[in-house]
Image: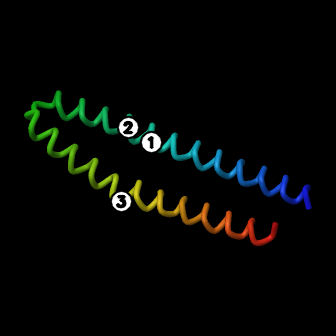
Amino acid sequence: MALLAFILNWFNLYIKGYVIKCLMRNLKEHALRYIITLLIDFYSNNSSREVLEKQYIHLTDSLILNLIPSTINIITFIVYFLHFINAYI
């Protein structure tokens, strides 16, 4: 029984680490893309207000369409995973 608990705990930590690593990589990629597009738009003769309005809309869409569903999926996975682990231990 202790071996099963150890294996499940190790698997849980491995999955959490992998998910966190993927989220951090995606966050870094989106942040870099955001900064680069902001600089390109700023230096291509657009006014600052136009650039900021467009980037704000893009950032809001990114948060709503990418980050919130991913967070809900991760929380759901953790709740179900912990529920099933507690049911078998």
- In front of the other: 68 or 32: 68
Identify the secondary structure beneath mark 2: helix
Q: Which mark is residue 31?
A: 2
What amino acid type should be assigned to the residue bearing mark 1? Leu
Alpha-carbon span between mark 3 and mark 2: 15 Å
Question: Residue 81 location in percent, x, y?
Answer: 67, 65
Query: Disc 2 vs disc 1: Cβ atoms closer than 8 Å?
Result: yes
Alpha-carbon span between mark 1 and mark 3: 14 Å
Question: Residue 80 location in percent, x, y?
Answer: 63, 68
Instruction: Give the number of marks.
Output: 3
Q: Compared to 48, does 13 lie above or below?
A: below
What amino acid type should be assigned to the residue bearing mark 3? Leu
Q: Which mark is residue 27?
A: 1
Identify the secondary structure beneath mark 3: helix
Measuring 17% from the left and 46% from the top, which residue is drawn there? Answer: 54
The disc, 3 or 2, on the residue closer to the chain's N-terminal end is: 2
